[in-house]
Amino acid sequence: MRVLSGIQPTGAKHLGNYIGAIRRWAAQQDEYDAFFPIVDLHSITFLPQDPEELRESTLDLAALLIASGLDPDRCTLFVQSHVPEHPRLAWVLECMTPFGELRRMPQFRERAASQQSFSVGLLTYPVLQAADILLYQADLVPVGEDQRQHLELARDLAQRFNQRFGETFTVPEATYPEVGAKIMDLQDPTKRMSTSESSELGILRVLDPPDVVRRKLRSAVTDTGRDVVRSPTKPGVTNLIEIMAAATGATPEEIESRFDGRGYAPFKEAVAEAVVELLDPVRLRFGELRGNTQELQAILAKGAEKAGAIAVPTLAAAYERVGFVTP
Ligand code: AMP
Ligand code: TRP
């Protein structure tokens, strides 16, 4: 079985990304043949990117993923733009996608509405995503709920292509995190933690140093009570319990009984220590990896080579079926 998921290099990664995506991927690399593209081509669709920033953040993310446990020897970690087969397949898929289907995509509508003008790339974004997946014949694609329509499109395109040109692509299956796997904003625990929407105090970045983690958790919003229990009327405390459970492996029930009657201050301190213990090794390892750009680039070059070994023959088969003359 093959698993594939992509992540955009732009925007600092936070605890939600780490727990909801990156850490799950690391757990999958021994069970599956795993592919993880850093999707830099997708990153230029929305906001104008500063070239130097894009380059830096791509290398930062590569280092962060490795520091988080993605092992380039046990999975295929690569940069999307290093494998030209992605846009080459996307073109063919674009020619099989009705315009109206893309125009109706919720993420497109939201983003297009937030800008005065937007690029064609923003519209065709989900087709490039489908190409990312189909090129590798991925069986499983772990993503967040917000990607549901994009994954439906990838499945439709695989089926459409296969029907028209003969069996070529695996029809991928999306997998979503279990309920409750959502990390909420520390200041507004009714919203999910998010790079674009959370305030500075609401978000815990994977690379935040320990004193910053402690400060943010100390000022996390709770409520006026003092009971450490999960409840729909206590979204802040519930979120902190979920964070501590995810960070330590303890069950939420164990955490509730451990802090029963002790009030919020010692509880928040314990959550902070749990998060520091979870993230600090990642931050330290990140520093080592990011300090050696040459080695990082060599790792990514090797990843692109491994990716190409699958992507090149898949694209060749697809182009041949479409009727392009073999070069
Ligand atoms: P994004 O940064 O929104 O593109 O998210 C990348 C991936 O991280 C998503 O597909 C989710 O699986 C995961 N993710 C993002 N935000 C959260 C969150 N607050 N809680 C849990 N998982 C999240
Ligand atoms: N659109 C995805 C996101 O914003 C990122 C992505 C690009 C992706 N290509 C992919 C996810 C392929 C899964 C599979 O999160």
Image (cartoon, rainbow, N blue to C red):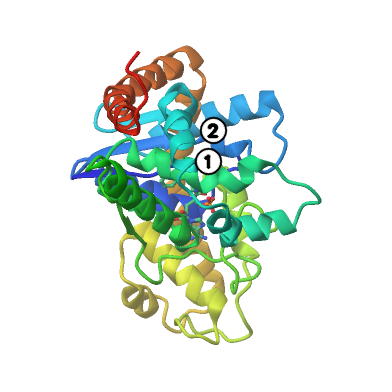
Residue 303 occupies which quadrant of the picture?
top left
| On screen, residue 260 above or below 11 | below
> How many discs mark residues in the rendered view?
2
- Count neighbours of disc 1 (C-alpha within 10 A) and say few if under 14, some if 14 to 19, many if 20 or more: many
Q: Residue 221's x, y, as percent?
A: 63, 72
Q: Residue 187's x, y, as percent?
A: 65, 67
Q: Residue at x 36, y 62 (%)?
A: 177
| Disc 2 target residue | 40
* Horizontal side of residue 196 vs 226, given as left or right: right
Q: Residue 115's x, y, as percent?
A: 77, 52
> Which quadrant does the C terminus fall into?
top left
Q: Residue at x 45, y 84 (%)?
A: 261
Kind of element beneath mark 2: helix
Judge by depth and name the residue closer to the eye, 57 or 319: 319
**Visible residue check, residue 320:** yes
Q: Are marks 1 and 2 in contact (CB under 8 Å)?
A: yes
Q: Is mark 1 within 8 Å of ligand 2?
A: yes
Judge by depth and name the residue closer to the eye, 192 or 80: 80
Judge by depth and name the residue closer to the eye, 315 or 22: 315
Residue 10 occupies which quadrant of the picture?
top right
**The furthest residue to the right:** 116
| On screen, residue 27 above or below 106 | above
**Which amino acid type is marked by label 2?**
Asp
Q: Residue at x 59, y 38 (%)?
A: 43
Q: Residue 120's x, y, as percent?
A: 65, 42
Q: Residue at x 59, y 43 (%)?
A: 12
| Disc 1 target residue | 8
Judge by depth and name the residue closer to the eye, 86 or 1: 86
Considering only order in the chain, which callout, 2 or 1, is on the residue closer to the N terminus? 1
> Which quadrant does the N terminus fall into?
top left
**Which amino acid type is marked by label 1?**
Gln
